[in-house]
Image (cartoon, grey):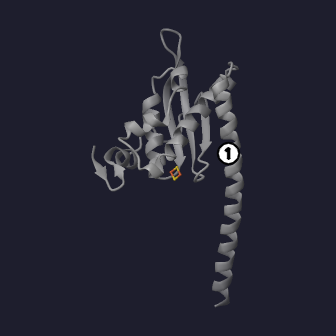
């Protein structure tokens, strides 16, 4: 495993050349998640198709992420890992799989991988809801938690935005006085 600074070679590669970045045309579902620790956000788009056995699989996936190096790398890698997976298998997905695929993340950056997994859960939730399918209890609980966290992030971001605006006005006022 090669290491470049704090990150592995794989993390840097995914960050510099992310796979499946951007929106999919006419996605079947979208998952939006926010990281409660830092406020970074991610959207995950999926296309779902039935395979020959009639199981619904993730045919295509892409992402848009506002976040750090680890957030971009984990977003990129999750879109690779979920393609071809049956929806019920994708629901068993865990952040450890992403971290393993990237040959590791610095311990303080492991929380960044939660963003990608949450966006995946939300995309599957969105798909089940749109298709009026029964939502598994585990997914429903995860959705409630993510919803609560998104609300909290919005609140925090609002306060931060207000502070930034006040600081900006102060700087401009001081400059015009000179
Ligand atoms: S610091 Fe926010 S996801 Fe990495």
Nearest the viewer among 22 and 76 is: 76
Q: Quadrant of residue 165?
A: bottom right
Confirm if mark 1 falls within 8 A of ligand 1.
Answer: no
Left or right side of 8 for 70: right
Q: Residue furthest left?
A: 2
Image point 69% across, 56% down: which residue? 156
- For the image shown, how many numbered marks are present on the structure? 1
Q: Residue 21, percent across and down? A: 47, 41
Q: Residue 13, percent across and down? A: 35, 46
Quarter placement of the N terminus: top left
Quarter placement of the C terminus: bottom right
Image point 52% across, 26% down: which residue? 92
Q: Is residue 88 above or below residue 114?
A: above
Q: Label 1: which residue?
A: 150
Image point 38% across, 41% down: which residue? 102
Image point 41% across, 50% down: which residue? 106
How crowded is the residue under tag 1: few (<14 C-alpha within 10 Å), some, or many (20+)? Answer: some
Q: Residue 50, percent across and down? A: 53, 15
Q: Residue furthest bottom?
A: 178
Q: Residue furthest front?
A: 107
Q: Quadrant of residue 119?
A: top right
* SS for callout 1: helix
Q: Quadrant of residue 162?
A: bottom right
Q: Residue 98, percent across and down? A: 44, 37
Nearest the viewer among 160 and 110 is: 110
């Amino acid at each position: 495993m090669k290491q470049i600074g704090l990150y592995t070679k794989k993390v840097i590669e995914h960050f510099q050349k992310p796979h499946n970045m951007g929106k999919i045309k006419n996605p079947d579902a979208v998952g939006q998640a926010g990281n409660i620790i830092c406020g970074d956000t991610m959207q995950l788009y999926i296309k779902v198709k039935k395979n020959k056995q009639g199981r619904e699989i993730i045919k295509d996936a892409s992402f848009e992420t506002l976040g750090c190096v680890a957030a971009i790398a984990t977003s990129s890698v999750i879109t690779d890992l979920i393609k071809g997976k049956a929806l019920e298998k994708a629901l068993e997905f865990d952040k450890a799989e992403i971290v393993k695929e990237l040959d590791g993340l610095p311990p303080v950056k492991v929380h960044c991988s939660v963003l990608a997994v949450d966006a995946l859960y939300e995309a599957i939730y969105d798909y089940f809801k749109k298709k009026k399918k029964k939502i598994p209890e585990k997914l429903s609980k995860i959705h409630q938690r993510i919803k609560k966290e998104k609300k909290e992030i919005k609140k925090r971001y609002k306060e931060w935005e207000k502070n930034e605006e006040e600081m900006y006005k102060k700087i401009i006022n001081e400059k015009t006085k000179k």
